[in-house]
Image: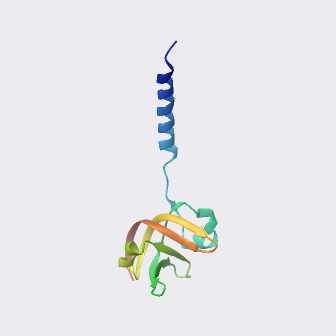
Amino acid sequence: MFPTWPRGLAIGVCLLVLSACGGSDSVSQVPLPVLAASPAAYDGDLVATQGVVRHFEDPLHYWIEDEDLHRVEIFPHDMIEPYLGSAVRVVGRFRFSPSEGRKLVLESVELLSEE
């Protein structure tokens, strides 16, 4: 009979390969009106959306918004601050809480145009 460790090793390698293939996080393209209307549906997802960067001083916070004022707060501030007033496409982890609202933790920012 064959030793059990090669079979266990083979099973472990197969599980690792399957989890690597199935565990990849794809980016969902979600317009701001959809995030505003159904935020719980995207909680925890990696999303891409776009809008114009705005801010408020007290307390300091940044967000992106569209023409109809659908908004998502953006973190970290130092990553989005250079784009203040500009149209951007952002990719990041979307979070929603009824008490804290909608926020996106950035992975990347792409400048679309100057406003």
Residue 105, image x, y percentages: 47, 67
Identified at 51% across, 36% down, the residue is 15
**As drawn, is 63 to the left or to the right of 37?**
left
Looking at the image, residue 109 lies above or below residue 22: below
Q: Which residue lies furthest to the bottom in this view?
A: 58
Residue 26, image x, y percentages: 49, 54
Report the front residue among 32 and 103: 103
Identified at 46% across, 33% down, the residue is 13
Report the front residue among 34 and 59: 59
Looking at the image, residue 94 lies above or below residue 114: above
Examine the image and state in which quarter residue 52 appears.
bottom left
Identified at 48% across, 49% down, the residue is 24
Assign the C terminus to one quadrant of the image: bottom left
Q: Residue furthest top?
A: 1
Report the front residue among 108 and 115: 108
Looking at the image, residue 49 lies above or below residue 68: above
Give the colour scheme of this rendering: rainbow
Q: How many labels does the image show?
A: 0
Looking at the image, residue 18 lies above or below residue 42: above
Residue 23, image x, y percentages: 51, 47
**As drawn, is 70 to the left or to the right of 75?**
right
